[in-house]
Amino acid sequence: MNKRENPYTPGAGRKPRTLAGRDQDLESFQSLVERLDAGSYERSLIYTGLRGVGKTVLLMEFDVLASEAGWATTDVQEVGSHHVRRHGQPPPDEHEPPAQSQATH
């Protein structure tokens, strides 16, 4: 496929021409909103994935669905990756640069 015509080019949260393969995710979120509207409980949704797979675009679509249902929403912004610390490690000092890891053989 020609790069110019590829609808799957990462765009840092920019909505692609085609939101392919996300119907089940959108239906799950729509169901969640409807259940909450009816006073029922629902589990949280968590989305993870590699950079460029469409997490931010999906969140923006969820924002539209929630707004259309009358829910208060907020802007979706990507805030970057956070250092994941292992159990027992102290939290990183915000004033120090992250430690450089060194590979060992």
Image (spheres, rainbow, N blue to C red):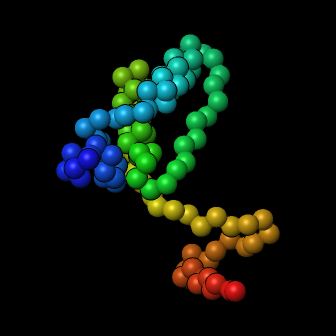
Q: Does 94 appear above or below 71?
A: below
Where is residue 73 drawn, in percent x and y? 41, 35
Identify the residue shown where x is 36% and y is 22%: 68
Residue 56 visible to the viewer: yes
Q: Is residue 33 visible?
A: no
Which residue is depicted at the point 52% across and 20% down?
A: 31
Where 34 falls versus 91 (above or below)?
A: above
In the image, 71: left or right of 16?
Answer: right
User: What is the x, y in percent for residue 86?
Assistant: 73, 66
Q: Is residue 15 left or right of residue 21?
A: left
Depicted 71 relative to depicted 16: above or below: above
Q: Is residue 71 left or right of residue 105?
A: left
Q: Quadrant of the C terminus?
A: bottom right
Where residue 39 sits, quadrant-wise, is top right
| Residue at far top of view | 38
Q: Camera-side residue: 27 or 3?
A: 3
- Residue 85, percent from left and from top: 68, 67
- Identify the residue at image location x=57%, y=79%: 98
